[in-house]
Amino acid sequence: MQGLLTSVFTLWFLTVYAAPGNAPYFYSVTAKAGDGITILLNRYELDEYECNMDKFLELNQLKRKDALFEGKEYKLPVMIYQYNGQSIRSTIGINDMDVAKRIANYNRIILNRNLRKSDYESSKILWVPYHELNCAQSNEKPIVIAENNTTPEKTTTTAISETASIFGSEYGNVLRKSEKLKGKVYYISAGHGGPDPGAMAQMGSRSICEDEYAYDVSLRLARNLMENGAKVHIVIQDGNDGIRNDDILVCDHDEKTMGTQTIPINQLARLKQRTDAINDLYGYYAKAGIKEQFLVCIHVDSRSENHRQDVFFYHFEHSKTGKKLANNVQEVFAQKYAKYRAGNEYEGSVSTRNLYMLRVPFPTTLYVELANIKNEADRKRILPSTNRQALANWLYEGLVK
């Protein structure tokens, strides 16, 4: 009798909790160190639509300002269907071919970012983002940032805000302030990272590494762009650094591409990994009708100790929009130097260079060299956090000029 009851209970359990037929269920994921709600949704390309945020909060019984806990499992607004082997439309019961194409492209992006192990056709598991079937219209993501002051503003307002842990605990609460850049996509890529610290210099017993300073300026720039409604992807991410206000930033090797992919040791493999991620996203947005997409690569140069240089810029020689973008940013820097530097001299240049990160990515690309890390005077441009914020502010002004 007990065995019969056990069998009946097991049958009831499967009937209630197993998806009958092709009924979808919501995908669950374990939060990583540094994850906030926005960072997690951004990783899975879900933060562009307000209804995805609302559904995530509903599924996990959270509020916008709540933090996520490392190691805890959360349900994402991604519905999992058993693919029928015929078509996406017949699998989920829709007629719209454009929606089906977007879903197919979404699955490809998730696969390329190593967020799933196999494609939907071979695994027969189809991922369908909640917004494709349930959102009436697109709303840009509800993250934005601080004022363009010398340090990021710590949000205390009760306006729409949430936790974005990629910026660190001190600046992780971010606020949308305008929609000025709505409909534009920016990819911010700090140079090097992971096993490659980039250029290095010694200050007494302390090492300073290019990738740490490029990353800090990248985060500050990302916040400035997101403040005004831009869709921003931080290409190289370090989940436990955030925006730092120290002069000496500790060198580490735990950065990952898009927050999930281990950065290869081989240089070409590193560059290919990040450009593949960028180009996949570019195609996704292009199919959605978004035309204005920009990539900003931020570096710190390495020359001889006696060589002092101003911030300078590269663009791809065959890109008219890239040249215009570089000139716009350079003009802003010239104006700022004229205002703030004694003597008013500024020699930052705009030129072309046949670099992989200029030649291969699809978005209009700006390549920035902030300083010569070997030169003591140049280092003063990047060591104080107030200067790093100023660099991010000026880059922002030039990008939106």
Image: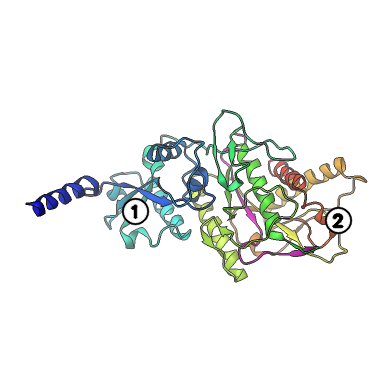
Residue under pointer 1 = 126
Q: Is residue 361 magenta?
A: no
Q: For numbered disc 1, what is the local secondary structure?
A: strand
Which contiguous range is marked in magenta?
179-203
First-in-chain label (2 vs 1)? 1
Rendered residue at 60%/29% (across/down) = 157
- The residue under the point 57% across, 64% down is 263
Which one is closest to the eye, mark 2 or mark 1? Answer: 2
User: Is 367 in front, or is 148?
Assistant: 148
* 185 in the magenta segment: yes
Mark 2 surroundings: few (<14), some (14-19) or many (≥20) residues within 10 A: some
- State whether residue 119 is above or below residue 184: below
Q: Which residue is rendered at x = 71% and y = 58% of the image?
A: 299
Q: State the image coordinates of residue 52 (x, y, percent, origin top left).
A: 43, 40
Q: Main secondary structure of the magenta part?
A: loop
Tell me which colouring the rendered structure shows.
rainbow
Which amino acid type corresponds to the residue marked 1 in the rendered image? Leu
User: Which residue is farthest right?
Assistant: 343
